[in-house]
Image: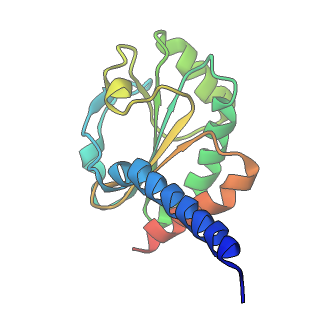
């Protein structure tokens, strides 16, 4: 049997774990349960895109800029994901915060992406999504609900992200 002192230490550990879980739920729950704000933006190709047009599809929404060092890697990663998962219902939309459309177009072309590059030079959409760090990735389910928010994906986080993505596609 453990001593009273050992039980007190265990109680404090359990208390810390419960507190950590509560904080995590508090931080994540609002993102996980909110409907993605709709927007309409023009692409570098000159076409208009509205988020709500993609209801019924899983959307990966990526906020980026040409001056962001990690963004190009994410753009390339999502092109590979698009090729793999588009037949299952994945749509990738990228939102460039660049003020010069030509810069965004140049980076997109160099990264070899074939999904829409939307222009948010006025930063209205990025403010709505609180894109205060780049790259920023949202996974939006088929009903238009934000289910995940990620900063740049490091290798160790990629497996968990892929599980989330596949789960959304399978729903």
Left or right: 170 with respect to 68?
A: left
Image location of residue 33, percent across then percent down: 31, 56
- Residue drawn at x 46%, y 10% is 99
- Residue drawn at x 68%, y 30% is 70
Q: Is 32 above or below relative to 71?
A: below
* Residue furthest right in the image: 155
Left or right: 28 with respect to 82?
A: left
Quarter of the view holding residue 156: bottom right
Left or right: 164 with respect to 80?
A: left
Image location of residue 81, percent across then percent down: 60, 54
Image location of residue 32, percent across then percent down: 37, 55
Give the quarter of the figure containing the N terminus.
bottom right
Q: Is 171 above or below relative to 164?
A: below
Give the quarter of the figure containing the C terminus.
bottom left
Residue toward you, 12 or 156 = 12
Image location of residue 149, percent across then percent down: 47, 46
- Residue drawn at x 59%, y 58% is 161
């Amino acid at each position: 049997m453990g001593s009273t002192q050992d039980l007190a230490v265990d109680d404090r550990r359990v208390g810390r774990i419960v507190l950590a879980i509560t904080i995590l739920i508090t931080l994540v729950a609002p993102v996980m349960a909110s409907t993605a704000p709709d927007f309409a933006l023009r692409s570098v190709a000159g076409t208009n895109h509205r988020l709500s047009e993609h209801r019924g599809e899983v959307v990966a929404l990526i906020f980026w800029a040409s001056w962001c060092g990690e963004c190009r890697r994410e753009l390339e990663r999502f092109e590979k994901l698009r090729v793999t998962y588009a037949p299952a219902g994945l749509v990738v939309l990228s939102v460039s915060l660049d003020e010069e459309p030509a810069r965004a177009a140049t980076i997109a072309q160099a990264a070899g992406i074939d999904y829409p590059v939307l222009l948010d030079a006025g930063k209205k959409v990025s403010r709505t999504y609180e894109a205060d760090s780049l790259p920023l990735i949202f996974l939006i389910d088929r009903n238009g609900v934000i289910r995940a928010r990620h900063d740049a994906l490091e290798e160790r986080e990629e497996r968990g992200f892929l599980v989330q993505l596949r789960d959304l596609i399978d729903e």
